[in-house]
Image: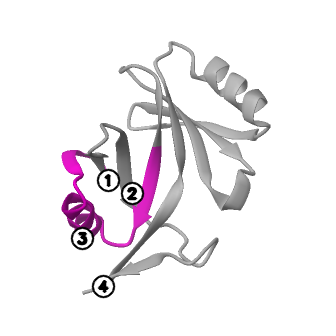
Amino acid sequence: MAHRSRLAGFIIDCETGEIDAAADFWSGALGLARVETYDDDGAQYAQLANAAGVLHVEVQKVDHPSRVHLDIESDDLDAEAARLEKLGATRIKFVKRWWVMQAPTGHRFCIVRMKHPELGPPPNVWE
């Protein structure tokens, strides 16, 4: 059965004690307005608005070293994880509602649920 996926956006992981200060910096650096800061089951996020091409950009408070990772959205998380494994990626762990993956290059990224397939560029369709 076919599934769809596409680049959803970027998450700026910040190993910091203060999410607001980190979000203020990245908002100013990228010229993106802060929309909201919120807590999702103990995880803290600050959403930034108006990124190019309707990409989703957030600052996330983390307890691992700071880095930037991308999110791929899909209407079938497991099918997308399997597709990416065939390309050489590795499943690291399932967290809440998404897969944390690792590319053969060592980069971490996540597969998240597709929210608005009608917005932005059409998703890729994979058989």
* Magenta residue span: 70-97
The answer to whether the residues at label 1 and label 4 have Cβ atoms under 8 Å apart is: no
* Point 79% across, 37% down: residue: 31
At which x and y percent is residue 45? 53, 35
Would you place residue 102 above or below residue 2 in this image?
A: above
Q: Is 41 displayed left or right of 118 in the figure?
A: left
Viewport quadrant of the N terminus: bottom left
* Image quadrant containing the C terminus: bottom left
N-terminal of the pair, mark 1 or mark 2, is 1
User: Which residue matches tag 4?
Assistant: 2
Please say which color scheme the image uses.
one colour
Residue 68 numbered tag: none
In which image quadrant can residue 5 be found?
bottom left
Residue 52 counted in the magenta span? no
**Label 4 CA crowd tier, 10 Å (few <14, some 14–19, many 20+):** few
Instruction: Give residue 44's position: percent from left, percent from top.
Output: 49, 31
Q: Are marks 1 and 2 in contact (CB under 8 Å)?
A: yes
Left or right, 50 with reference to 99: right
Q: Which residue is mark 2?
A: 112
